[in-house]
Amino acid sequence: MRRPRWIAASVMPLAVALAVAGCGSSDTGSGSSSGSSTGDEGDTNAAISIFGTEPENPLVPSNTTETGGGKILDAMFTGLTILDGTTNESKNAVAKSIDTTDSKTFKVTLNEGWKFHDGTEVKAKNFVDAWNFAAYSPNAQQSASFFEQVEGYKDVHTEDPDGTDGPQTAPEPTAKTMSGLKVDGDYAFTITLYDPFSVFPLKLSYSSFYPLPDSFFTDQKAFEANPVGNGPFKFVSRTPNTDVKLTRFDDYKGSDKAHVKDVTIKIYDSSEAGYQAVVSGDLDFIDTIPPSSLAGDKWKSDLPERGASTEYLGHQHLAFPLYDPQYKNADLRRAISMAINRQEIIDKIFAGTKVVADGWTNPKVPGYTKGQCKEACTYNPEKAKEALAKSGFTGKIELTTNADGGHKEWMEATCNSIKNAIGLECSYAPIPTFAETRQKINAKQMTQIYRSGWVADYPSIENFLSPLLRTGGSSNDGEYSNPAFDAKLTEADKAPSVDEANKLYQEAERLLEADMPTIPLWFQTAQYGWSERLDKVKLTAFRELDLSQVIVKK
Amino acid sequence: MGRYILRRLLQLIPVLIGTTFLIYFLVWSLPGDPFAGKCGDRPCPDAYINAMREKFNLNDSIFVQYGKYMLNVLQGNFGETFNGIQVGERIALAFPVTLKLAVVALVVEALIGLTAGILTGLRGRGFLDNLVLVSTLFLISLPTFVTGFVLQILLGLEWGIIKPTVQSGAPWSQLIVPGFVLGSLSMAYVTRLTRTAIAENKRADYVRTATAKGLTQRRIVGVHLLRNSAIPVITFLGTDLGALMGGAIITEGIFDIKGIGNLVYRAVLSKEGVMATGVITLLVLVYLLMNLIVDLLYAVLDPRIRYD
């Protein structure tokens, strides 16, 4: 499927260097070569089109947790902090400073002069009002739980006493605003948390923490039809299921200004269709190369030197419903883990594009250390057999996940690996849809070992540990509970600085290998491709095109 | 005639009520909570799920839900999708696109199918007849998605003649190949139907009479033979328009055409009953109206058929 007439476009040496570096298994090379101020800005009046999917919710930041709407909002809004495209370190954006002495009270000072797209200024109350709106339970925002550490959250957000299926309804909240948020003037506010939480500032780049303009609170419907942000791009128009048009906001004050002028997010029904559009030059960028084109490295010949692969903040695990007594034995869990030949599965099923996981956090976040899960995450049939014998487990196991996500091949390969290594009878029993799978998991009705794919919300190793594995964590679906681990996390939360917190989080992570509450399989990678017009193309750790760097060749 | 049409139109009402309820019920009875998977691998807050269920009446019994839905529809309100967009707006955007695609497909199958059918029917056995028979057999045995992908890859990617995906707004020129793919199967049927009808009627008494009267060949075929052979073909073409519109899911998917096939598919997957019901009701309407038109055409083609 080689199309020779396109090769002519790759004469630009920079493009070649970039793409060659990017084509390897890691993108460390391409990141450093595409710094922001190296002269060439390309055509600053250019328009580009990028792949998108239809947003699942109205375009309100606190109600958007999926990528289709997320990538639009991320281009349109800038929070207190933004992430460095290369290192994923958090740096100040709207915030001038975020100060704390005890990791419990944070004094936030804003930069003056930032404006919303409707011309009004970004003030402290825009943040505080937006956060209170998100947390207030009658507003029914998806990402309300991101504010659970803020003092007063429990007064504004009430839980349904008998779950969503029961007859009772949640009581009316006693307050409308969180007592932990205090406006100290136009450009300053204070955040007080229930308990010290050292990595709290790292959360602030996430979309639920974006500010909202005053107009949102007077007419929400009008805002949804015509969203107003404060980010590098402003909203132009939207045609449902067709496209969303954005244009550069020239009054933007942030450091992540864009070089291109217009961005059209074109909605595609499948990544296959989007991919074909990129190959034929109708679309400039796609963040997901479909599996059919990854097979046999077809994409590398379809998009010669116009594709790259990078790791992102996600991982694939096998999780146990620990509320089911048959999985209580840690030796069984270790045996299964050591019976999985991860590298072979990656090579055979994913053409080598994933990275074997050696722990529960992720190499792309600051604070990651290597080899947190050494022995138990390494393929070793002998030791696996020993562990299985020690556990005394007899019978068979089943792996499951949603059938609509393309997981069949690797799930079956994993099963076969377990079967061949330790002779444990294993079969793959999928559940038809993702929604049904989530329903079963949420209701704690799982009886099989299931896939757990987590993508971080903010770049901290804490985000891979607390929500997933802490007792009562918001996404601790398997109900894992380990007092020593919890105690270490609490200690880390109280640490005075992020660096010290990270050391303690790492210690907590090391406690997990003995227990194997989940089995780390691999770190996720994303493959992306672009048209011959683009240059300096980079994918962020959240699988979005880095709009601040991309340029259109002159 | 007028009374007949009126009676047929009145019959539409119970059929529509029946189908909408059936569709609504089927989507409603799909397993799974539509909001359980909305927040990725994190459970959604109770408040969110409760509010969404409340908004879309999912806590009511199916009959109450359906009643509320129909009350809104009668007032011209087709409801809202989960992401807050009017169903009416979505359909208004997608319906013309699918209609265009179906019309292209219909024109392709009528033009090519009728021509090939008439030629082979008139000539009888021979090379052309065998060629058409073999090629239609080939088309009938190919699933649409094979034809679709082959043409997309060959014409779109290998030779660069067409755009592999149709752009927004779906210009007519970009719909020719998708239309051909969509209509290819029916085209084969039309060819065979026409061929059989013509071959049969060629030996009919009235044709012999017409020939004996000394009419020109052109008039015999054009007026007498074609008109009498057209009834089965028209029946097929008429009902096929509905089938083409509803059956375009695969073709729309391959060429990324923003039509209603995809809308229904997505709606069923995400359990958006309001959306699925709205679109399918429209399809049912198209079917019924096309059937009515076909029935009326019978009377035009064959004066012996009268409605009263």
Image (cartoon, coloured by chain):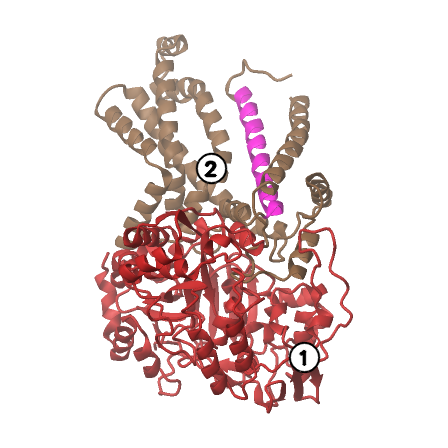
Chain colours: A red, B brown
Locate residue A460, reporting x and y percent: 48, 77
Query: Is most of the magenta stretch helix, strand or loop?
Result: helix
According to the picture, the residue beneath numbered tag 1 turns out to be A128
Q: CA distance from mark 2 to mark 1?
A: 53 Å
For disc 1, the chain is A
Indicate the quadrant where residue A133 lies: bottom right
In front here: B11 or A38?
A38
User: In x, y percent, where is residue B132?
Assistant: 28, 28
Q: Residues within 10 Å of mark 2 (few under 14, many from 20)?
A: many
- Label 2: which secondary element: helix
Badge 1 local density, few (<14 within 10 Å), some, or many (20+)?
A: many
Q: Amino acid at mark 1?
A: Val
Where is residue A431 shown, x and y percent of the image? 47, 47
Q: Are marks 2 and 1 on the same chain?
A: no
Decide if residue A523 is on the left or right side of residue B307.
Answer: left
The answer to if B129 sits in the magenta stretch is no
Per the rendered image, the range of residues in magenta is B272-300
Question: From what the image shows, is residue A290 above or below residue B6?
Answer: below
Q: Which residue is mark 2?
A: B244
Q: Quadrant of the N terminus of chain A?
A: bottom left
For residue A143, which quarter of the picture?
bottom right
Give the camera-side residue of A374 and A514: A514
For residue A389, side relative to residue B290 (left or right): left
The C terminus of chain A lies in which quarter of the figure?
Answer: bottom left
Magenta span includes B276 = yes
Q: Nearer the viewer, residue B105 or B28?
A: B28
Residue that appears at 28% across and 59% down: A381
Q: Is residue B73 left or right of residue A115?
A: right
Residue A26 sits above or below residue B227 on the image = below
Estimate the x, y position of residue A526 in percent, counting from the top left: 37, 66
Q: Is residue A339 visible?
A: no
